[in-house]
Structures are given as C-alpha cells and as structure tokens.
Amino acid sequence: MLTDEILMQRALDLAQLGGGFVVPNPWVGCVIVRDGIILGEGYHAQFGGPHAEVRAFAGIQDARGATAYVSLEPCSHTGKTPPCADLLIKHHVKRVVICNLDPNPLVSGKGVAKLEAAGIEVHIGVLAEKGEALNRRFFYFHRNQRPYITVKYATSSDQFIAHPNGKAQVFSNPISQQLVHRLRSEHQAILVGVNTANADNPSLTTRAWQGNSPLRFVLDPQARMSENLVLVEDEFPTYIFTQDLCKSEGNKHWIALGTQNYLQKFIEYCQEKAIQSILIEGGTKTIEAFIKQVTVQEIIHIESNEVLGSGISTPQIDEVNATEYKLGPDNRWIIQLSKENLTQ
Ligand code: AOF
Ligand code: ZN
C-alpha cells in the first residue's frame, strides 16, 4: 500500500534531483496521487524555473479529488511563477500533505491558509526531520537571518593541512573531490582567506560535479591578494573583502569593511545581500576565526591516509558527535552537524 510516508519519501527523492542548480531556492518535490495511482510528479529543477507543483501538474488533465504530496509548503506569492497554492486549488485536489512549512516570510503559513480556506484538507509534518535535513541551509537562513556556514578542510593522517612553506598537498581522492564540488554547487558562496588564495591560486568553481558555481569570496583585510590569480583573471565574479580598499574591475569587486569588527561586518554584508550559505575552504587561520568569532553550522574534515611529517597544523576543532564515512581506500569523510540548527 502507498502510505503518506512512502509518497513523501518519493517527493523528497525528487526534490534532491534539483542538485546544484536551485540554490538559493530550496529543494522541493511534488507527487500527485489518486486511488493509489501516481498521476504526475515533478521537482524544482533550476533557480528561477517552474516550481515542483507546476511541473507535477504539467501533464495532468484531471486531478479532481487527488492528494498532492509536497516536500515544502506550497507558495502563496507571485514570484517568478504564480502561487502554487492557487494551482492546487484550481485542480480541485482534495488533500495536500506537506513535509515542512516554508519559513520564507513571503510564504510562512500563508500557503496552508489559502488551501484550507478553499476547503482542502492539509496534513503537515510527514517525514519532517528528513525535509529539515535536506533544506537545512535554506531553513537556517530564513529562521536566523544569517548565512548557514559550512567549514571544509582536508588533512594528512598526522593532521597537517599543507607543507611547512604553505605549499598545498592534494589529500582528496576522486570520490571526495566530487563530493566537495557537489558541496560547492549547494552553497551560495565559497570563501577562502588571502593566504590560501595567494598560495594555491584556486578557481573555486564547480567542475567535478554538475551544478552552478558559487559566488567566490576572499577575506583579505590588508589588501594583500596578488592580482595574477585565476580568481582575478577568469570570467567568474569574485568579491574581495578588505578593510579599506574599495574598487570594482568588471565583475571583480573589492569591498571595504572598515578596521573594526571585520568578521562581524562581513556577516552583516552577507545578511544585507541575503547570502544564504557559505562554504569555507580554508585555511587554518580563516577557519579558526569563523569557529571562534562566528557560529559554524557544519564541519567537514577530509582525512587522507598520507603522512606529511611536518607542515601547517589543522584547525583546532573537537570532533564531537561526528559521523565518519570511508571514501575509497585512502580517504575518510568526517562530518559534524549542529543538531540544534536542524530542529529550531
Ligand atoms: C513552492 N514550490 O518548488 C519551490 C518553492 O522566486 P520564486 O518565484 O522561484 O520563489 C522562490 C521561493 O518560493 C523560495 O524562496 C521558497 O520560499 C519558495 N519555493 N515553493 O511552492 C517549489 N521551490
Ligand atoms: Zn510555488
């Protein structure tokens, strides 16, 4: 028998197919069912594109009396598409089953209110915890009005992140590299400190996974970043946060945050620009500054089997309640999630 849980799981599985293309929107899936038969299904596949409900109804002639399973409260606002709550009402569905309410102030209960006012039975909270985990960054941002911050770093088995002179060492293997690029596509911005930018000359784009590249941020209080870097010379936008250098050259922007409370000012900038999520990819000083001065919601440590013997030490982080996955023969993926941020 097709239970509410089974069909909501289907909606959540569909939601995930939006992958790295929907950020900063949430992942949403929708399944329309009548008499045990799936009439249609869809998911939000691209930022700015049709919502999950629109795609689910696309091929349906008659959905009267059906039940719609939606992983997020149907929207009530006219955004890039008309309200999904109106679409469900227009199709005369009888029942709507929702995994999570939408904390976006544009929706936030108004979608449910619209459905109920039209006489539709609404059931909220099926597989709620799974939905919370899936859209944790979107939920955290809307509930706390600040970006969800993930820290990611890779080390040798003797806990060094680079050689003594700062020269990078590749610790990831092809599997962890794919997962890192997937993480990039799932965050709105990626951030490194100036030392990492100068030493590694990184591109910080999404290449080993399908999806959009995040906005690139560099913390560079003293404006020491070399201009002969991929981050300055390629075609993608970069934002360099200094204390007092303020200029723009094409899509490369230097933003002055002042000399006082630099990190706090950076967070305020992100709040003002509605940056939902940031992936911090190093180095040690930058990661430690965020852990000490700003709250971090998720920490991912990639540990290789390799031994360096000496080098730049790993950030000081207690690995409490961490979950470990073995990735291939030589990598471990150690993840710590702040539980309180998932259930607020
Ligand atoms: C839904 N179904 O599939 C999604 C929803 O700019 P827009 O018009 O795309 O609206 C984005 C907001 O709509 C997003 O922040 C979230 O509140 C909601 N997303 N709602 O009914 C969907 N993706
Ligand atoms: Zn919608």
Image (spheres, grey):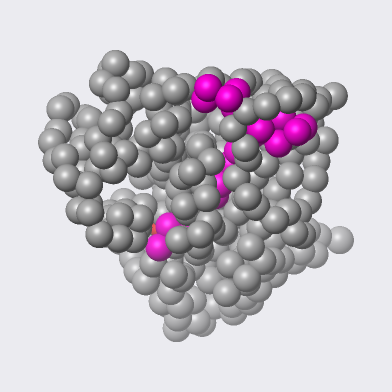
**In this rendering, does residue 309 appear at all?**
yes
Asked if residue 64 is among those painted magenta in the image, a careful observer would answer: no
* Rendered location of residue 125, percent (x, y): 65, 73
Q: Nearer the viewer, residue 96 or 58?
A: 96
Q: Is residue 93 above or below residue 153?
A: below
Classify residue 164 by image quadrant.
Answer: top right
Per the rendered image, the range of residues in magenta is 146-166
Q: Does 29 sit left or right of 231 as displayed? A: right
Question: On the rendered structure, is 342 left or right of 166?
Answer: right
Q: Is residue 55 visible?
A: no
Q: Is residue 163 magenta?
A: yes
Instruction: Name the spot of residue 200 as percent of width and height, x first.
Output: 47, 22
Which quarter of the image is occupied by the C terminus?
bottom right
**Vertical placement of residue 304 versus 77, above or below:** above
Quadrant housing residue 216 = top left
Residue 212 in picture, x, y percent from top left? 44, 33
In depth, the one of 113 and 185 nearer the eye is 185
Residue 238 locus on image (x, y percent) = 30, 32
Residue drawn at 73 percent across, 54 percent down: 319
Quarter of the picture containing the N terminus is: bottom right
The residue drawn where x is 54% and y is 63% is 72
At 51% across and 59% down in the image, what residue appears?
Answer: 292
256 relative to 43 in the view: left or right: left
